Image: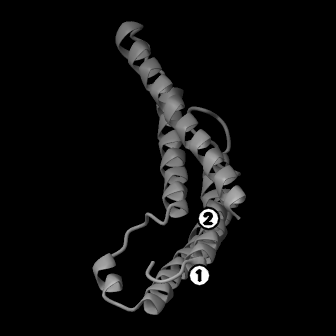
Amino acid sequence: MNKLREILTHLLNVLAGGSFLVMVVLTCWQVLTRYVLNNPSSWSEELVSYMFAWMSLLGASLVTSERGHMNIPIFIEKTSPAMQKIFLCLAEVIAFLFSAVILAYGGFQIANLAMGQMTSSLGVPIGIFYIVLPLCGILNMIYTLLNVVDIMKKEGAV
């Protein structure tokens, strides 16, 4: 299980970092074309916005892998270790359901729907850029299952 988590996390780090690197290069290109060449590049601006969305969603999956999503630990810490496990597992189940319904299922539906619509500057189907939604949904589902296994393995307080 830990090997799967390591591989997925490494892949996500590369993809999210690559998205950030592409954003930096394209933003520099935008500045160069706009202010030095006086001929703004419209395609790079559009691609930067899509790369930002990819980076954000991939980063959210990384946060899920570390169980770093938002919570209020003060309530959980005041309960018994058994109740802590139940609450933590419940939080993972809720994250799993959100990822399954909204990101994976809904993301697949919207990506499929958007395949017929082209981007204005790039001329590629918008659905290609929406593929990250179901991808991150599936990754989040895998991570939440791994998180539940880790929570259940721990002895005592979590």
Q: Is residue 122 above or below residue 134?
A: above
**Crowdedness of circle 1 by 10 Å Cα count: few (<14), some, many (20+)?**
some
Q: Quadrant of residue 81?
A: bottom left
Identify the image's colour scheme: rainbow, by chain, secondary structure or one colour.
one colour
Tag 2: Cα neighbours inside 10 Å, few (<14), some, or many (≥20)? many
**Reading the chain from its start, which is encountered first: label 1 or label 2?**
2
Figure check: 93 above or below 8: below
> In this orientation, which residue lies closer to the viewer: 153 or 52?
153
The C terminus lies in which quarter of the figure? bottom left
Q: Residue furthest top?
A: 37
Q: Position of residue 125 (x, y in %)?
A: 67, 44
Q: Is residue 86 above or below residue 15?
A: below
Q: Residue at x 49, y 85 (%)?
A: 85
Residue type of the residue flagged with mark 1: Met
Instruction: Name the mark on residue 152.
Output: 1
Q: Which residue is at the far front?
A: 155
Q: Where the N terminus falls, by quadrant?
A: bottom right
* CA distance for labels 1 and 2: 23 Å
Q: Which residue is mark 2?
A: 137
Up/down of 32 relative to 2, above or below: above
- Residue 131 visible at all: no
Give me the residue at 65% from left, 49% from top: 117
Residue at left 43%, top 66%? 69
Q: Secondary structure at mark 1?
A: helix
Amino acid type at image mark 2: Gly
